[in-house]
Image (cartoon, rainbow, N blue to C red):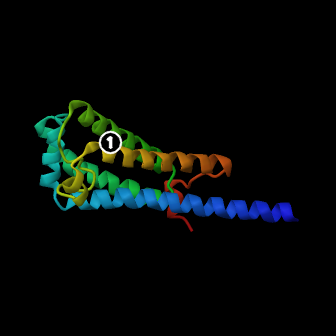
Amino acid sequence: MAKTQNQNIKSLAAGWSYLVIRLTLASVFFYAGASKLFDTQGFATVISGYGLLPDSLTSFAAIGLPVAEILIAAALVWDVKGSLSIYLLLLIVFMGVLAHGINMGLDVDCGCFAPGDPEAEAYHSLREAFFRDLVLLAGCVSLYWLRAANNYSPRSFFAIFSK
């Protein structure tokens, strides 16, 4: 009897941990995407500062990336199958861009939240943004581990609209 109760407590704790980590990751992407949508021109300037995209694509990226972040965040809130993988993929891309900026010695805004965000003005460093992304990466790994340890599978997109 005590073993069953202990398993129930562990299952409840894993469920809450899964929810809190998932909502934290989603809130970071949602905030980042929404804040950049308020100044797409400024974000396009930040993107061009990295020198990775041709000028013809910076305006598209300045709108597309924030919209993608918001959609990924919403999908992660509802725990849609594939949303964590897409989150992880975009996070790795962001980390690659930051690593490029660090390697090149660029002194640019990371572009993580919005041009002129308080963090960028205070530190103006890509390293802090890279390490913050490492924490988000650890959150993603934790979610994958919790899924595997608890034999849990996220919902399909269509399951959200059923019932």
**Vertical placement of 10 versus 99: above or below?**
below
**Residue 52, located in which quarter of the rendered image?**
top left
Q: Residue 78 versus residue 2: which sits nearer the camera? A: 2
Residue ranking furthest to the bottom? 163
Residue 140 visible to an observer of this rendering: yes
Q: Residue 120 versus residue 18: which sits nearer the camera? A: 120
Residue ranking furthest to the front? 123
Q: Residues within 10 Å of mark 1 (few under 14, many from 20)?
A: some
Mark 1 lies on residue: 94
Q: Position of residue 134 (x, y in %)?
A: 42, 44
Q: Where is residue 99 in the image (x, y as percent from the top left)?
A: 30, 35
Q: In which quarter of the image is the N terminus?
A: bottom right
Residue 82 visible to an observer of this rendering: no
* Left or right: where 2 falls relative to 71: right
* Left or right: where 36 falls relative to 15: left
Q: Quadrant of the C terminus?
A: bottom right
Q: Where is residue 76 in the image (x, y as percent from the top left)?
A: 46, 56
* Left or right: where 86 falls relative to 31: right
**Residue 89, located in which quarter of the rendered image?**
top left
**Vertical placement of 115 versus 97: above or below?**
below
Q: Tag 1: residue type?
A: Phe
Q: Position of residue 14 (x, y in %)?
A: 64, 58
**Vertical placement of 95 versus 30: above or below?**
above
Residue at point 23% right, 51% down?
Answer: 123
Secondary structure category for the residue under label 1: helix
* Left or right: where 155 falls relative to 8: left
Residue at point 17% right, 41% down?
Answer: 107
Residue at point 27% right, 61% down?
Answer: 34
Residue ranking furthest to the top? 103
